Image: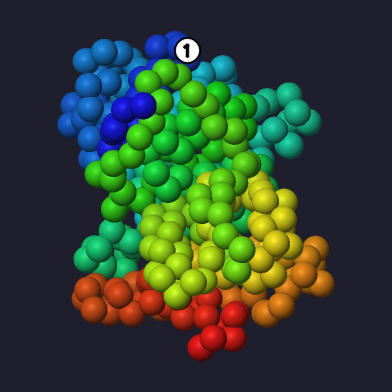
Amino acid sequence: MKNVVFREALREALSEEMRRDENVFLMGEEVAQYNGAYKVSQGLLDEFGPRRVVDTPIAELGFAGIGVGAAMNGLRPVIEFMTFNFSLVAIDQVVNSASKMLEMSGGQVSVPIVFRGPTASAGMLGAQHSNAFDSWYANCAGLKVIVPSNPLDAKGLLKSAIRDNDPVVFMESEQMYGDKGDIPEGEYLIPIGVADIKREGTDVTIVSFGRIMKVALAAAAELQKENISAEVIDLRTIRPIDYATVINSVKKTNRLVIVEEAWPLGSIATEVAFKVQKDAFDYLDAPVRRVVSADVPLPYAPNLIELALPNVAKTVRAVKDVMYKS
């Protein structure tokens, strides 16, 4: 094993796949000469040249469309959005072209493309640069949506995404690019659509994904001090969702809290809660609880950001609620 930061794990995935398959290329704003806005693509231009590491104008709709066309013609583009907040400019290409082409062509035209970049809150960037669009894209048939929470998963899942024949939206937290973690020395892949039990427990199941896994794990550690054993599940992929892992856990713990950086309406937490009450209702000893963002545009002030987003205290309180220990 070796210890790397999140951005390095992504870079390894990109470089390994570009060496393995000459059809893989990276395109986006500042990915080449500037080495990427968050330095994920550092050194790739030197190794692979400007034909495969392509700087673009500030025109998300344009270069996303070029990527979709390239994928339809046999290439495997990785399209980097400087932030998924900017992907709204290109959302027509993602949800109206990439996601629908296989169905509309009767299975004749696949679109093996990855749209990747940072998502959700990054601190004091204001409401227009702080949206968690994970559940938006997960609502779209034809897409696969991945939100990794650590360097190990980031590398293995990005490699799987690049090799996948379907369009994949790969969402990274802007606040995690410097996070460190151990990854294997050699090549490895992690299958899409398989959740991971990060911590085993017996009293309550906590489900999350992406950066908010830090909140879930920290809450579990706090709860352990009070002899509450929390099982923590990282969904990793939110389309498709590994419902079986969640339901099997709930059958053991009989309680569920879902933690997610999203607005309440139409969240992944809402969907998971529905599925659990449908397929594991008789095992529940308390109503399912969600810990999500406040139903407001994210504020700028740090104290208001803390109030708006999920945190450890809110998660601990939700767990105690489902255990009737409030």
Query: Residue 29 in the image: x percent, y percent?
Result: 28, 37
What residue is shown with label 1?
21
Query: Residue 43 in the image: x percent, y percent?
Result: 22, 22
Q: Is residue 255 left or right of residue 16?
A: right
Q: Is residue 17 left or right of residue 3?
A: right
Rendering quarter of residue 132: bottom left
Q: Nearer the viewer, residue 77 or 263?
A: 263
Q: Nearer the viewer, residue 221 or 165?
A: 221
Q: Which colour assignment does the render follow?
A: rainbow
Q: Residue at x 29, y 41 (%)?
A: 180
Does the image show residue 51? yes
Q: Amino acid at mark 1?
A: Asp
Q: Residue at x 45, y 75 (%)?
A: 226
Query: Residue 203 in the image: x percent, y percent?
Result: 60, 69
Query: Residue 277 in the image: x percent, y percent?
Result: 75, 70
Could you classify mark 1 by the number of other residues whose Cα lies within 10 Å: few (under 14), some (14-19), or many (20 or more)? some
Q: Looking at the picture, does residue 139 appear above or below residue 31?
A: below
Figure label count: 1
Q: Residue at x 52, y 27 (%)?
A: 189
Q: Looking at the picture, does residue 311 appear above or below residue 161?
A: below
Does the image show residue 143? no
Q: Looking at the picture, does residue 48 appear above or below residue 148?
A: above
Q: Nearer the viewer, residue 139 or 222?
A: 222
Q: Nearer the viewer, residue 73 or 138?
A: 138
Rendering quarter of residue 211: bottom left
Q: Quadrant of the N terminus?
A: top left
Element under disc 1: loop
Q: Is residue 121 left or right of residue 240?
A: left
- The outermost residue toward the left is 34
Q: Residue at x 26, y 67 (%)?
A: 126
- The outermost residue toward the bottom is 326
